[in-house]
Amino acid sequence: MKVRRGHYPLEIIPKVTPLSDAAGEVISVGSEVINFKKNEKVVTAMNGDFTSGPIKQEIFTRVLGSSIHGVAAEYVVLPENFLLPLPRNLSFIEGSTLCLERPLRDSGSTSQTGRLGPGSGHGRSGAKVVAVTSSAAKAEVLKQLGADHVVNYSESFAALKMDGLVALVGFRSGKPQEQNILTSIGSSFATMRMVYVGPRSQYEEMNRFIEQHNIHPLVDKEVFPFQNLRESFTSLASMKYMGKVCVAVVGS
């Protein structure tokens, strides 16, 4: 939504093809491609240059859907490091939801998720799952998926413990809203930090875990045909979806 409206904080090239999350089939490879072959099923990596280690400024030079053309097309040409194998237990639609998912945490930790992501994957890793959502209806779905605790995001600051951590995932796509952060969290002495997508090494680890435990992402019941791509943005803006909003390319 931010890219479409020209509000994305990173570079946006002129007339960019938007979107970064996709799954599909390789139809041709270049002479120097090593890791993929024709007919292989793959998923995209939004930032293929972020392979491992800490975040560095140079990894933002090539980001799908902003500084390089994205995947809102029937055919795309991508460097091979922007692709990973599709987990064998997932469909193309399910695989298209993985690009921005966070890696699983270590056993015994508490994992907070602000999205209706890949089922109870965090719980299967041994983490206690605290889910953040926007409505009572979505809260019930999250409980059915195995969330240990569900918090309405409008009340999430009130759930902070002393010396807690506020992990900011993504950016708001709506109108800016004034909020006194010091009033909201000052008395808890919490730390706030941005959270970026994990490196490729963690993406690969997550996909192996998804395949091993047969985890399936939650996809909204309405999957849009490619010719209705604009309507998918309307659905996203409505906040009424229950799971990932997906678009199916003809024949997928």
Image (tube, rainbow, N blue to C red):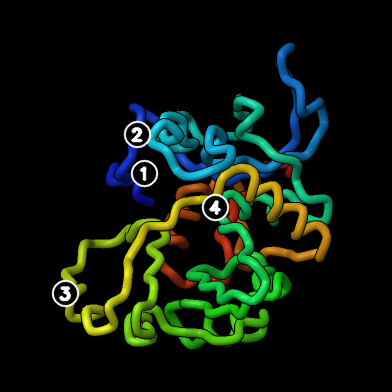
Residue type at mark 2: give it.
Ile
Q: Nearer the viewer, residue 248 or 182?
A: 182
Q: Quadrant of the C terminus?
A: top right
Q: Looking at the picture, which amino acid does disc 1 mark?
A: Val
Q: Are marks 2 and 4 in contact (CB under 8 Å)?
A: no
3D distance between C-alphas at marks 4 and 1: 15 Å
Q: Residues within 10 Å of mark 4 (few under 14, many from 20)?
A: some
Secondary structure of the residue carrying numbered label 1: helix
Mark 3 — residue? 180
Horizontal arrangement in the rendering, residue 34 relative to residue 176 (left or right): right
The residue lying toward the viewer, choosing from 109 and 183, is 109
Crowd band around label 2 with a 10 angstrom C-alpha radius: few (<14), some (14–19), many (20+): many
Query: Observer-nearest residue: 232 or 24?
Result: 24
Distance CA(mark 2)–CA(mark 1): 7 Å
First in sequence: mark 4 vs mark 1: 1
Please identify the quarter of the rendering in which residue 59 is found. top left
Q: Residue at x 52, y 38 (%)?
A: 47
Q: Residue 87 got which mark?
A: none
Check disc 4 and give the amino acid type: Leu
| Residue 12 - label | 2
Q: Residue at x 46, y 62 (%)?
A: 235
Identify the residue at the far top of this view. Answer: 31
Q: Is residue 188 above or below residue 65?
A: below
- Image position of 139 (left or right of 44): left
The number of discs equals 4
Residue picked out by circle 4: 100
Q: What kind of element bears circle 4? A: loop
- Residue at which label 1 appears: 3
Question: Around disc 1, counting alpha carbons within 10 Å, would you say few (fewer than 14), some (14 to 19), or many (20 or more)?
Answer: some
